[in-house]
Image (tube, rainbow, N blue to C red):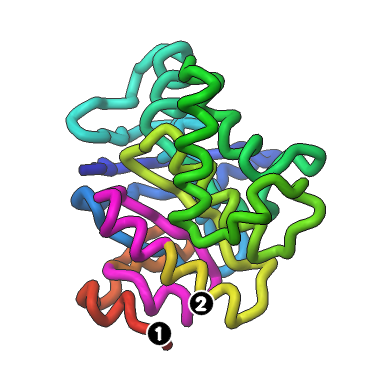
């Protein structure tokens, strides 16, 4: 479970104080697929950075499975990101001159997993995200946008994280491919019991998640819940 408690992040801009995240609190049970919608500049990416320990809050706390991030030293935060968090980005952030399987293997190398085991798991994850087997050894720059996003999702799953944070994961994809990606995330949250939080400006994508939040001027509100069966069905 992830618990967010009165989270605040402020920035100084000249003589003004900006609060992109302003007293945000919510909980997500393990295995939930949730989304946060909001306009550009509403604070979505700032909130995601706080949850992923890429940034530190001005006040408040994030608690993951009973472990508080507040006051945690940088070395422990690095371990938390490596062990418990998987990131999926709009721009994919893959290494273009490496193959799909090598990209998925990288996080496991940092975690100290043997090469043979890394390769076997990477191939298994690429199969789970439905990348054609003959494309496992292709360089990233020879894959389509949708295929690259599947590789990015497999990489996010590499170290079996408890939480996946996805920042506009369909932003660079056409509508049909984007729909396939959100359905894939839904099935992965079920199959791996992984909590997945998607940040997006795309209402149709958010409508397919079990829980939906809206972030506006730093304030978070929850919208009516949807059942998993409804969330997982095609639009």
- In the depicted view, which residue is nearer to us: 163 or 35? 163
Task: Look at the numbered discs 2 and 1 and tell me whether their residues touch, using CB distance below 8 Å.
Answer: yes
Residue drawn where x is 26% and y is 41% of the image: 5
- The answer, for residue 135, to whether it is visible in the render is yes
Please report the bounds of the magenta region as a residue range: 185-210
Estimate the x, y position of residue 204 in percent, counting from the top left.
47, 81
Estimate the x, y position of residue 17 in percent, counting from the top left.
56, 42
Tell me: 32 left or right of 52: left
Q: Judge the density around disc 2: few (<14), some (14-19), many (≥20) Cα neighbours within 10 Å.
A: some
Is 55 one of the magenta-colored residues?
no
- In the depicted view, which residue is nearer to us: 11 or 154? 154
Q: Is residue 173 above or below residue 164?
A: below
| Disc 2 element | helix
**Number of disc labels:** 2
Residue drawn where x is 48% and y is 35% of the image: 120
Mark pair 2, 1: CA separation:
8 Å
- The image quarter containing residue 212 is bottom left
Mark carried by residue 179: 2
The residue that label 1 is drawn on is 234
């Amino acid at each position: 479970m992830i618990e967010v408690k009165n989270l605040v992040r402020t920035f100084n801009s000249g003589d003004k104080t900006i609060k992109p995240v302003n007293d945000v609190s919510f909980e997500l049970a393990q295995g939930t697929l949730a989304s946060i919608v909001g306009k550009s500049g509403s604070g979505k990416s700032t909130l995601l950075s706080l949850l992923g320990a890429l940034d530190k809050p001005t006040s408040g706390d994030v608690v993951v499975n009973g472990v508080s991030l507040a006051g945690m030293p940088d070395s422990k935060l690095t371990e938390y990101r490596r062990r418990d968090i998987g990131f999926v980005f709009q721009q994919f952030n893959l290494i273009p001159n490496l193959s799909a399987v090598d990209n998925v293997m990288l996080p496991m190398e940092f975690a100290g997993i043997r090469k043979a085991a890394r390769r076997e798991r990477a191939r298994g994850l690429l199969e789970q995200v439905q990348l054609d087997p003959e494309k496992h050894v292709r360089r990233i720059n020879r894959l389509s946008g949708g295929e690259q996003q599947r590789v990015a999702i497999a990489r996010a799953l590499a170290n079996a994280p408890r939480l996946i944070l996805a920042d506009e994961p369909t932003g660079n994809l056409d509508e049909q491919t984007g729909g396939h990606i959100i359905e894939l995330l839904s099935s992965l949250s079920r199959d791996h019991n992984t909590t997945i939080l998607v940040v997006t400006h795309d209402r149709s994508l958010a409508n397919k998640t079990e829980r939906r939040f809206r972030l506006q001027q730093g304030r978070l509100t929850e919208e009516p819940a949807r059942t998993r069966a409804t969330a997982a069905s095609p639009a």
